[in-house]
Amino acid sequence: MIFGTLAGIDISSGLGVGIVVAAFVGGAVLFVIVRAIIDKARQATLATELSAIRIAADAEAQKICAQAEAQAKSEYLKRREQFDKETKITRQELRAEEKRLAKREDSQEQKRDNLERRERMQETAERALAEQEKALANKDRHLNDLIGQQKSQLMKVANLSPDDARKIVLEQVEKDAEQDAAKLVSQKLEEANETAEVQAREIILQSIQRYASEQTCDHTVSAVDIPSDDMKGRIIGREGRNIRAFEKATGVDVIVDDTPGVVICSAFDPVRREIGRRTLERLIQDGRIHPTRIEEITSTVRQELNKEILQAGKNALMEANIHSLHPKLVELLGRLQFRTSYGQNILQHSMEVAYLAQVIADQLGLNGQVARRAGLLHDIGKAADHEVEGGHPQIGADLLARYSEKPEVINAAAAHHGDIEAETVYTPIVLAADAISASRPGARRDSLERYVQRLEKLEGIATAFEGVKTAYAIQAGREVRVIVDPSNVDDRLTQKIAHDIAKQIEAEMEYPGEVRVTLIREVRCVDYAK
């Protein structure tokens, strides 16, 4: 509008120029003033906004600090709770470790006491032996003097030749030596019994009491019941095709005779016999008996039985607390479930031997785990003795060696029947546990023929000794009573004869448990009053 006004003024006049300049200057000054006012207002607005932003930032900072403080406090409480929990667990572990160390110290003290007691017993035995050796030396000198005296007296009185005198003297010396040896044997046995018998009886009684199992009465059943005698014809089949297919598939002989309601499965291998028995039972229940069905059921039963055998081996290992056993040995161990010896189940017998061996080893301060392992596997050869030639101790030792078992376990399996010498201390422990398990009442049954043969052999060994009149085997062959001729055997020789008979029985016979030898010397004097 200013410029519009200026446009209407005549620029050529001087007044017009002055007005224009004044108007321009005034507009510039006015622009500067307005710009300053606007800038001041803008600065005031920016200051207000900055103050508001600062206040908001302070509030946000306080909020963040409060949250951080709350989180830090929560994390502190959580860490403190975890620390207290870990401290409690560590404290419990330390208490358990203290108890275990205290128990170990008690065990070490007990072992130390046992060792000291054994050392004292050994020192006593050594002193007694030295005294006996001294006494024997004195007796030897005394006997030499007696020989010289008797020799001179005989030559003076009887005018005997040196050879005859020597013969008489030697007979007398031999008789005196036998009597002295019998007396020495009796003394030695009494001394050994005073120390060893009490400890051995205590250890064995503790082992038997701590393992109280049922008497063994299981055996492999080979008889299969049938609903009627008509089923026998179906089992045989047309022209015998069913029974031939059954025997071919199972490897078991089927005996169908006139016995009512029963068919017999016969096989030397107990596992095959069990497969045949189960297969025949399923065929009778199913009713469809033909070659194809026989093969199908036989295959199914064999697979089921293999799984059962493996599971039985695993259960035995779990019960015996034994680990890291080769899978083949686990399978062989399970096969023992179907093996019996004199009516005693071999797997159950092995479990008994394992436990008893561990108890005896613990009582003696030895490694109970090694003894338990050796006891469990000592009869493993019986699982394969139908397939491999030789006795089950050697078969078992070969199997254990093949699958890298410990030398103690291998030697226990090979020597637990005395076929070879024991190389470790665990072998006699397994042998003792085996005898305990086999000889306890009701554990095994024996055939009448073998029973009679054992009794006759016991009596024959006893009567073969010079001076024995007769002998009687009593208590199922666990005791032999020997009656000697009192005119030929005096009291000092009775102990020696009983000892020799016992050693002869140990060398020539196999029997469970022990055989007691009782020697009787009796003098009867009879007279009549008339």
Image (tube, rainbow, N blue to C red):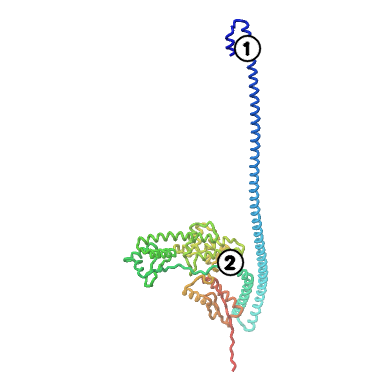
Give the structural element (helix, strand or loop) at label 1. Answer: helix
- Residue at 59% across, 87% down: 525
Measured from the top left, where is residue 319 in percent x and y? 54, 61
Q: Is 462 on the left-hand or right-hand side of 229?
A: right
The mark that comes first in sequence, 2 or 1, is 1
Numbered mark located on residue 429 in the image: none
Residues under numbered marks 2 and 1 in contact, where contact means CB atoms less than 8 Å apart? no
Measured from the top left, where is residue 66 in percent x and y? 65, 39
Q: Nearer the viewer, residue 98 or 353?
A: 98
Q: Quadrant of residue 63?
A: top right
Give the structural element (helix, strand or loop) at label 2. Answer: helix
In which quadrant is the C terminus drawn? bottom right
Q: Residues within 10 Å of mark 1 (few under 14, many from 20)?
A: some
Q: Is 96 on the left-hand or right-hand side of 389?
A: right
Q: Is residue 162 visible?
A: no
Residue where numbered disc 1 is placed: 23
Q: Quadrant of residue 236?
A: bottom left
Q: Is 282 on the left-hand or right-hand side of 514?
A: left
Give the residue furthest to the left. Answer: 239
Numbered mark located on residue 210 in the image: 2
Q: Nearer the viewer, residue 142 or 151?
A: 142
Q: Is residue 60 above or below residue 210?
A: above
C-alpha separation, residue under disc 2 versus residue under disc 1? 130 Å
